[in-house]
Amino acid sequence: MASKLLQYYVHHYDELILIAVRMTKSYEDAEDIMQSIAVVLCKKEKELEHVQNCGAFLAVCIRRAAINFFRHKIHETITDPYYLEIYREKTDAQAEKKNSPEYDYLEWVESLESHLGSYSPDMRNAFIAHYIDNVPLSEIAAKRGISVKALSGRFARMRKSLKNNAKPMFDQFNVLILL
């Protein structure tokens, strides 16, 4: 019998892969990430029975898998001359775009998580889910069993903390949530 986490994964695959596509900007890479997550879920089914919020757990898994995917991709060694030339052309083009928001997105999210390090992982994930992944405030509040007003107040304190401790990050964050 499949665990509730695997059942959630299968039932909500379309929504979950959209999260991965948003991070990787590639459907093929997103499928690779989702497949690697499915393998881990199958292998560690017993260890993951304690997971209460399947959606949040899988969203965090996807985010971390995407970050690891890009880290691994950067360190891949290319030996075929044909692909090496393609890689050089691609990296030259990426170097020109180095300051683009798409290029820095994953590093930026990781930096945002570290600047919010004094808050619980649950609150950091809720903050990112609301402001980055556009999850409605009411949905997050309902999942945590608190009022929307209380959650809004916590987010206001988190934004103030960003403003006071990471001014450039706060400016980028404001631009992002206005898009």
Image (cartoon, grey):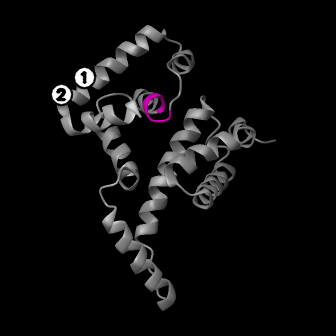
Picture coordinates of residue 112 (x, y %)?
32, 39
Marks 1 and 2, how far apart at CA:
6 Å
**Left or right of 144, for residue 155:** left
At mark 2, the secondary structure is helix
Give x and y (percent) for residue 19.
56, 43
* Disc number for residue 160: 1
Asked which quadrant contains residue 139, the reply is: top right
Question: Please, which residue is most extreme toward the right here?
Answer: 1
Which type of secondary structure does the marked residue at label 1 adopt? helix
Q: Is residue 70 visible?
A: yes
Where residue 13 appears, as percent x and y from the top left, is 70, 43
**Above or below — where is 90 with respect to 24?**
below
Q: Nearer the viewer, residue 47 or 90?
A: 90
Main secondary structure along the magenta-highlighted residues:
helix
Left or right side of 64 for 165: left
Lateral position of residue 172 relative to residue 38, left or right: left
Question: Which residue is located at x 50 percent, y 30 percent?
Answer: 134
Quadrant hosting residue 125: top left
Q: Dot 1, crowdedness within 10 Å: few (<14), some or many (≥20)?
A: some
- The three-letter code of the residue at mark 1 reads Lys
The label number, if any, that marks residue 164 in the structure image: 2
What residue sits 31% from the left and 66% below the top? 96
Q: Which residues are magenta?
A: 129-133
Of the 4 image quadrants, the one containing the C terminus is top left
123 relative to 134 in the view: left or right? left
Residue 127 is situated, as x and y percent measured from the top left of the image, at: 41, 28
The residue under the point 68% across, 38% down is 5
Nearest the viewer among 160 and 43 is: 160
Instruction: Give 66 or 84, whichever is nearer the viewer.
Output: 84
Magenta stretch: residue 71 in it? no
